[in-house]
Amino acid sequence: MATKQFLFSGFGGQGILFSGKFIAYKGLMDGKQVSWLPSYGPEMRGGTASCSVIVSDEPVGSPIVSNPDILIAMNLPSLDKYESTVVPGGMIFLDSSLIERKVERDDVKVFYIPATKLASDNGMPTLANMIIVGKVLSELNDFAPESVDAALAKVISAKRADMADINRKAMQIGAEN
């Protein structure tokens, strides 16, 4: 793996920070060095939110991701802002239910996932983020059930432990699309 730099971005309330924290914990469960740096506007719900995550075999020197290998864009303003920052050869995962335009670059691999629609159709309207995470893990060939389950146990609070199965199902839906 060496080092993978992720940038998650969208509106507050879309689970951007949760998704990033999940990837960071999954990296920890896999024995990697990680950093997780959240950023959000003054109004958590509806404001912009982004989260930088670095997963590496080496110690992480700085938590700031300026040029991500992997961009997860959950809304159009995020794609508009960060599309140009992805490294050539990188990957862009976007919610095609909410973003109608196509990626303008041809030097990156793009995945159009109708995550919001899939989440709604499957009775999990708040889990579009985890559908995209499932697709990311699938494309990285990193969908190891043991570390996925261990990371879910870390990011889902004890009082919401019943949400682990539905999060796992959302990721499976993403992996299969």
Image (cartoon, rainbow, N blue to C red):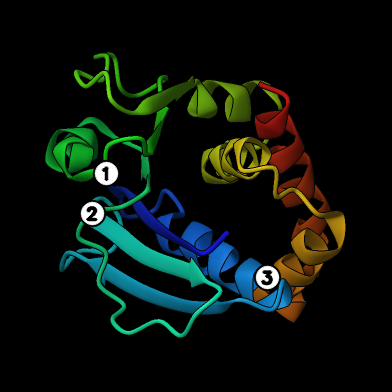
Disc 1 target residue: 87
Q: Does 11 sit left or right of 35 as displayed?
A: left
Quadrant where the image shows the N terminus = bottom right
Disc 2 target residue: 67
Q: Amino acid at mark 2?
A: Asn
Residue 17 to residue 25: above or below: above
Q: Earlier in the sequence, mark 3 or mark 2?
A: 2
Q: Does 99 sit left or right of 25 as displayed?
A: left
Q: Amino acid at mark 3?
A: Ile
Q: Does the residue at mark 2 contact the one at mark 1 (Cβ under 8 Å)?
A: yes
Q: Position of residue 44 (x, y in %)?
A: 28, 64
Picture residue at 21% right of the left edge, 54% below the top = 47
Question: Which numbered dot is residue 156?
Answer: 3
Q: Amino acid at mark 1?
A: Val
Secondary structure of the residue carrying tag 2 is loop
Picture residue at 61% right of the left edge, 30% below the top = 119
Secondary structure of the residue carrying tag 3 is loop
Picture residue at 20% right of the left edge, 36% below the top = 83
